[in-house]
Amino acid sequence: GKATLGLRPEHIVVGAASVGFEIIEGRVSVVEPMGADAVVWFECAGQTMSLRLMGETELKPGDVISVGFDIAKASLFGADGSRL
């Protein structure tokens, strides 16, 4: 059946920090400065995702980014929303 892969924003890394992880590309849609960190919203394969960066960022809407994640930190959810 269908399943959804869940990733926490703090478990996604950008650029060179993503070496050794599962890699995907996306296009930045929104950058939200939050003081000590920033939330970056991006589009990937028709889905909206977010990542959290510590401190300030030079990313801006329209930028294409490579991001990575450790699959061991991901969660899988069934069609009914239950964790698998």
Image (tube, helix red, strand yellow):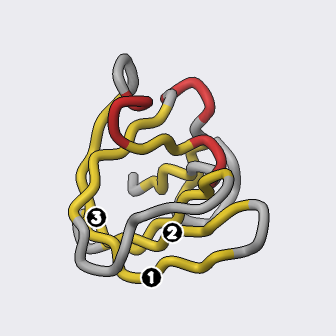
User: If you read the primary sequence from the N terminus, does the residue marked by circle 1 or circle 3 appear first?
Assistant: 1
The answer for how far apart the CA atoms under marks 1 and 3 are is 13 Å
Q: Secondary structure at mark 1?
A: strand
Q: Is residue 11 left or right of residue 30?
A: right
- Please tell me which residue is depicted at 56% across the width and 52% down the height of the picture: 6
Please say if the residues under marks 1 and 2 sit with CB atoms less than 8 Å apart. Answer: yes
What residue is disc 2 on?
A: 40
Q: Is residue 27 left or right of residue 84?
A: left
What residue is disc 1 on?
A: 30
Residue 39: percent from left, percent from top? 60, 68
User: If you read the primary sequence from the N terminus, does the residue marked by circle 1 or circle 2 appear first?
Assistant: 1
What residue is disc 3 on?
A: 44
- Please tell me which residue is depicted at 61% across the width and 41% down the height of the picture: 11
**Residue 62, which numbered label?**
none
Q: Is residue 1 left or right of residue 73?
A: left
Q: Nearer the viewer, residue 44 or 67?
A: 67
Q: Secondary structure at mark 2?
A: strand
Q: How many marks?
A: 3
| Depicted 81 relative to depicted 61: above or below | above
Q: Marks 2 and 3: which is nearer the front?
A: 2
